[in-house]
Image (tube, grey):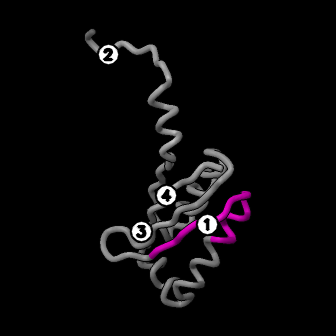
Amino acid sequence: MPKYLIQATYTADGLKGVLRDGGTGRRQAVERMAESVGGRVEQMYFAFGETDTYVIVDLPSNVASAAVGFTISASGAVRTKTAVLLTPEEVDDAARMEVAYRAPGA
């Protein structure tokens, strides 16, 4: 199952929810969200700095990842960035794949 890194930054309203629900309450909500689209949370961490939460999640597809991102962003309580994560073996496969490409101006 594809893995994704979701970086989340809470708005002021989102932070009020974290204060009310606590970190474990937010983790439970994120776990339910992932499970609702057929996925699972591998890890979730809160952090200092520009990004408030890092979540590594297994989701069944890019479509499921997009649905999660749309839903989270539409709440207005959280801004997210999502990165597709590749295993070292997937990088090996990509490095061996032949690609027909012509650079601009070449």
- Rounded to the nearest angstrom, the CA distance separating label 2 from label 3 is 37 Å
Going from N to C along the chain, the mark reached first, 4 or 1, is 4
- The tally of labels here is 4
Circle 2 crowding by C-alpha within 10 Å: few under 14, some 14–19, many from 20: few
How far apart in space, not on screen, are marks 4 and 1 (Cα)? 10 Å
Foreground residue, 33 or 75?
Answer: 33
Residue at the spot of label 1 = 41
The residue shown at (45%, 71%) is 53
Sooner in the amino-acid sequence: mark 1 or mark 2: 1
**Which element is circle 2 on?**
loop
Distance, label 1 to label 2, CA atoms, is 39 Å
Q: Amino acid at mark 2?
A: Ala
Residue in view at x 68 percent, y 50 percent: 60
Q: Which residue is mark 2?
A: 103
Nearer to us in this view, 84 or 67: 84
- Specify whether residue 35 is painted magenta: yes
Query: What is the spatial separation of the Cα atoms under label 1 and label 3, in whole angstroms?
Result: 18 Å
Q: Amino acid at mark 1?
A: Val
Q: Is residue 58 magenta?
A: no
Q: Which mark is residue 9?
A: 3
Q: Position of residue 75 (x, y in %)?
A: 56, 67
Q: Please give the range of residues in magenta.
A: 31-45
In depth, the one of 57 and 15 nearer the eye is 57
- The mark lying in front, picked from 1 and 3, is 1
**Amino acid tagged 3:** Thr
Q: Residue at x 52, y 32 (%)?
A: 93
- Distance Cα–Cα, label 3 vs label 4: 13 Å
Q: Secondary structure at mark 1?
A: strand
Residue bearing the label numbered 4? 5
Q: Amino acid at mark 4?
A: Leu
